[in-house]
Amino acid sequence: MAFWVFYDHLGKLVLANLVWSAALLGPMLAGVSAFVTGDGFLIFAIAVPAFGLSFGVLVPLFGAGLAHLVKEFIDTGDGSFLDLFRGMGLYWRRALGVGAVYVAGVAVLLTSGWFYATWLGSTSPLLGYAMSGLAMWCLALVVLTQMLVMPALVQKKGGVAATLKLSALLVLDNVVFCVGLSVYFVMLAALSLVVPPFGVFFAPSLAVVLSSTAYEMLARKYAAIEREKTGADGGLAGRESSVVSRCGKLVFDDTKDDYLNRGFRDFWTPWKA
């Protein structure tokens, strides 16, 4: 699904990626330039605010806009580039709230991991390393939830706390799935570092497509489970799910999904499909 969504709407997604990259260029350059000097004053006066602006404001804001744009692609098979800005307008307050929570959470957990290992490592090593390990496991959970938080926000349209709770529950209930998804995110990040133009033109929008289609698959799964139990839609998705249940088994009615029923013919000769 992620491949065909990206393939069908490549032009709009690349344009959205360029807007995202242009917005991040100034703050990231300022932050990295100040950080590599090693000067404590420049780091706290320039790098910390620049990175805070980037990851606490711009990334969640554009992430929500892109998630809304991709939702339109999945729901309707089409969408306007302007949906990027409509999504930003619809969700900017909650997106900024989510971004603030994540920036604060990551900062606290990283600091805790360093503090317990360093300051308790010599006097109470068992306790220190246990507390540090716990902080790192919590950090891993936070990182995994980041992949699903924006699709959860635009699909459920809930508040900050409800969105964070839903993302955490999805990760905890689908650990293997989310770890596998994280591998793709690591690959995108590594490729962006090795080939910077890939990051500028493709990586962020492709990451949002991956997270949005992953959320769509999970939504269909839980809708099928709910229908199996009660005969009603579970309501994870923002629209009616296209799944049914038969003979005590979950059956995904994916034959109606254009993104999931294509082959090499559609790639090489799309005009014949």
Image: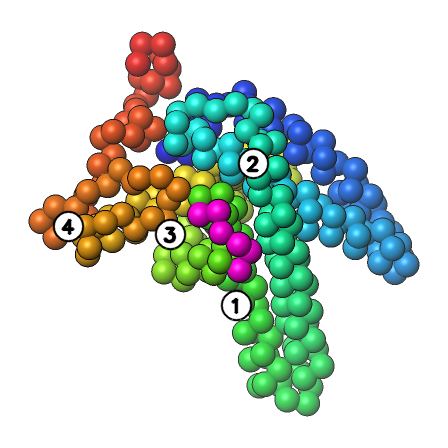
Mark 3 → mark 1, Cα distance in angstroms: 17 Å
Is 190 placed left or right of 169 in the picture? right
Disc with the residue nearer the chain's start (4 vs 3): 3
Is disc 4 placed on a helix, strand or loop? Answer: strand
The segment highlighted magenta reads 156-161
Q: Nearer the viewer, mark 2 or mark 1?
A: 2
Q: Position of residue 196 (x, y in %)?
A: 66, 33
Is disc 3 placed on a helix, strand or loop? Answer: helix
Q: Are marks 4 and 2 in contact (CB under 8 Å)?
A: no
Confirm whether residue 120 shows in the render: yes
Residue pointed to by mark 4? 249
| Residue at screen point 41% across, 45% down | 215
Is 237 placed left or right of 82 in the picture? left
Q: Position of residue 104 (x, y in %)?
A: 67, 62
Q: Nearer the viewer, mark 3 or mark 2?
A: 2
Is disc 1 placed on a helix, strand or loop? Answer: helix
Residue pointed to by mark 1? 137
Mark 2 → mark 1, Cα distance in angstroms: 32 Å
Q: Nearer the viewer, mark 4 or mark 3?
A: 4
Count residues near mark 2 (Cα–Cα under 10 Å), then give few for <14, some for 14-19, many for 20+.
many
**Magenta stretch encompasses residue 184:** no
| Residue at screen point 44% across, 57% down | 166
Disc with the residue nearer the chain's start (3 vs 1): 1
Q: Amino acid at mark 1?
A: Trp
Q: Is residue 33 above or below residue 268?
A: below
Give the quarter of the figure containing the N terminus: top left
Mark 3 → mark 2, Cα distance in angstroms: 27 Å
Q: Nearer the viewer, mark 4 or mark 2?
A: 2
Count residues near mark 4 (Cα–Cα under 10 Å), then give few for <14, some for 14-19, many for 20+.
few
> Which residue reaches farthest top?
271
Q: Amino acid at mark 2?
A: Gly
